[in-house]
Amino acid sequence: MKAIVCAVVLMFLKSLLLSQYKLAAALSNHTERSALLAFRDQITSDPSGVLKAWNNSIDFCKWHGVTCGRKHPGRVIALDLASGGMAGAISPAVGNLTFLRKLLLMENGFNGDIPKTIGHLHRLQHFNMSFNSLHGSIPASLANCSDLRVLDFSANKLTGMIPVELGYLPKLDQLVLDNNSFVSVLPSSLGNLSSLTILSINCGLGSGSASYCLHGNIPEELGNLAKLRLIDVSGNMLSGTMPPSLFNLSLLHTLAVAVNQLHGKLPPSIGTTLLHLEAFKLAGNRFTGPIPVSLSNASSLSVVELSQNNFGGQIPPEIGRAGNIWYFNLEINQLEAYDAGDWMFMDSLTNCSSLQMWALDENKLAGELPSSIANLSIELQYIYLGGNHISGSLPSGIQNLANLYTLDMTLNQLTETIPEGIGKLQNLQFLGLSSNKIIGHIPASLGNLTQLASLYLDDNDLERSNPFITGEHPETE
Ligand SMILES: *[C@@H]1O[C@H](CO)[C@@H](O)[C@H](O)[C@H]1NC(C)=O
Ligand SMILES: *[C@@H]1O[C@H](CO)[C@@H](O)[C@H](O)[C@H]1NC(C)=O
Ligand SMILES: *[C@@H]1O[C@H](CO)[C@@H](O)[C@H](O)[C@H]1NC(C)=O
Ligand SMILES: *[C@@H]1O[C@H](CO)[C@@H](O)[C@H](O)[C@H]1NC(C)=O
Ligand SMILES: *[C@@H]1O[C@H](CO)[C@@H](O)[C@H](O)[C@H]1NC(C)=O
Ligand SMILES: *[C@@H]1O[C@H](CO)[C@@H](O)[C@H](O)[C@H]1NC(C)=O
Ligand SMILES: *[C@@H]1O[C@H](CO)[C@@H](O)[C@H](O)[C@H]1NC(C)=O
Ligand SMILES: *[C@@H]1O[C@H](CO)[C@@H](O)[C@H](O)[C@H]1NC(C)=O
Ligand SMILES: *[C@@H]1O[C@H](CO)[C@@H](O)[C@H](O)[C@H]1NC(C)=O
Ligand SMILES: *[C@@H]1O[C@H](CO)[C@@H](O)[C@H](O)[C@H]1NC(C)=O
Ligand SMILES: *[C@@H]1O[C@H](CO)[C@@H](O)[C@H](O)[C@H]1NC(C)=O
Ligand SMILES: *[C@@H]1O[C@H](CO)[C@@H](O)[C@H](O)[C@H]1NC(C)=O
């Protein structure tokens, strides 16, 4: 008898629990579904029509872009509507999808603000809103999304301050805020993001896209980000010097601070502390002092973009030793060369078998071009050496560089004749030799250059009897 009563009571309890569980599940299903519907209702444009099928006759877990959890059936863990051409606001109801781990709405036309209710998404790990038209500022409530690993708001119209609270996201791995219109400093709290590997707040100033940007100094605390591999704060209005601690981040492969108002000298040891450096972009600042010789120790170095600064002294003689540089731009600086020793860097650049771009124009380079120019990479497309004091002849070995598009040696002190072999540069589109002291006749082989669109030979001592000045051929200017 007792046993039967017990069994009945147990069964009753079990069914009560089960029905309570069902009730809870029904309630949570209702919350999730209505949050999704509220989200849908704010979308004003859905060119591919995927949201038409977001209706009550279909389980919401099967709606396009919606993923529910396996452990938590009926809980939305991912909402992925990337590249759907959608427009409209983001409903604050999205904050009710509390199991959400991924919110991927990039490459649409979402506008309006980022709802503050995002802060309810404690499980959010991956939040990508890049390439939309979001306005307003980043809500400080994001700091509540303590599981966040990836945050990408690049290419929107966000304004205002970058919230200090972003520094309270202990698991953040990638913070990408490129191409917005913040009016902000770089918060020093970002130095707390001990998991960060990518920090990119390239405002795009100088490329025409931005009008407001980051100002103030680069905080020293960023040097605490020991796992950082990429930092790009180019195209802003940052001033002051680079905090020395940044040059200690031994895992960095990209250091980009181009187009700012930074000044100061580079530490001599940079190439040994930043051993993994691949892209080194400091162009368009006010840096001074020499280019550290130690850079040749960074054996992965492939992009050297130090143009438009006030770097002086000699170009490190072994800069190309490791052979990986393909982009080498030091134009518009105060770099010096006087004798063959100062041009040794050219010999080392012959090791760079992928070199495509080589620009040293508007410096203070004198002396003769070494004949090793003949051994530069066959892939070389651009040589800019104009506005220096280079003397001697244009080495005949130049004819080896069969893929050259541009050879600009305008405004130098070249003497002797133009080598006949120049006619072998079948891809040449631009040849600038104006304002030198070149003599002799213009090689007839120039007539072979069918791609040549610009030829500048004026202000030299060339003989008058030349076929180009009398007509028939590419524009002579
Ligand atoms: C979101 O949750 C709040 C609080 O539980 C509730 O008041 C609101 O109606 C919900 N919104 C939607 C669209 O479900
Ligand atoms: C819901 O969407 C499905 C899939 O597009 C469609 O077949 C169905 O007719 C829709 N139901 C209603 C009530 O709109
Ligand atoms: C809640 O939704 C999930 C997934 O659609 C479904 O499996 C489950 O049966 C629903 N629960 C209730 C009580 O409606
Ligand atoms: C963030 O978390 C704090 C503390 O848990 C809470 O008081 C606050 O309401 C939360 N804000 C949001 C937007 O979730
Ligand atoms: C965010 O989405 C864009 C566009 O699809 C993509 O290019 C970018 O890599 C994503 N960001 C991150 C940090 O994964
Ligand atoms: C930022 O804008 C520039 C210039 O319009 C563009 O070249 C670059 O690709 C953009 N980057 C991103 C991440 O949107
Ligand atoms: C974060 O950084 C700020 C400023 O650098 C510091 O004052 C604060 O104590 C740090 N907070 C945490 C949680 O680490
Ligand atoms: C850089 O690292 C070295 C060696 O770990 C250390 O002695 C030095 O103080 C660090 N410099 C800065 C500016 O953090
Ligand atoms: C840097 O390279 C030079 C050779 O140019 C070498 O002597 C030196 O040991 C290297 N330094 C380090 C730290 O690797
Ligand atoms: C070219 O590379 C080889 C092999 O890495 C190296 O031994 C040599 O010193 C380099 N030559 C120059 C001129 O840098
Ligand atoms: C070019 O390289 C070849 C083979 O390494 C070498 O024999 C020749 O001397 C070099 N020429 C010049 C001008 O440096
Ligand atoms: C280039 O032009 C010259 C003179 O016009 C001609 O003799 C020669 O065969 C041509 N060479 C090449 C490589 O096209």
Image (cartoon, rainbow, N blue to C red):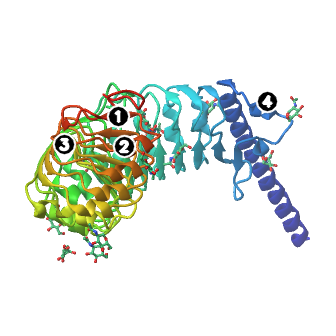
The residue wearing badge 2 is 444
Q: Is residue 216 visible?
A: no
Does the beta carbon of the residue at mark 1 sit less than 8 Å from ligand 12? Answer: no
The residue wearing badge 3 is 438
Residue 160, picture quadrant: top left
Say which label, 2 or 4, has the lower sequence index: 4
Relative placement, left or right, of 209 versus 360 is right
Q: Quadrant of the C terminus?
A: top left
Query: Closer to the observer: label 3 or label 2?
Result: 2
User: Is the C-beta separation of discs 1 and 2 under 8 Å?
Assistant: yes
In the image, residue 441 above or below residue 172: above
The single residue placed furthest to the top in the displayed view is: 44
Q: Amino acid at mark 3?
A: Ile
Does the beta carbon of the residue at mark 4 sit less than 8 Å from ligand 2? Answer: yes
Query: How would you rate the neighbour count of disc 3 (Cα within 10 Å): few for under 14, some for 14-19, many for 20 or more?
Result: many
The residue wearing badge 1 is 467
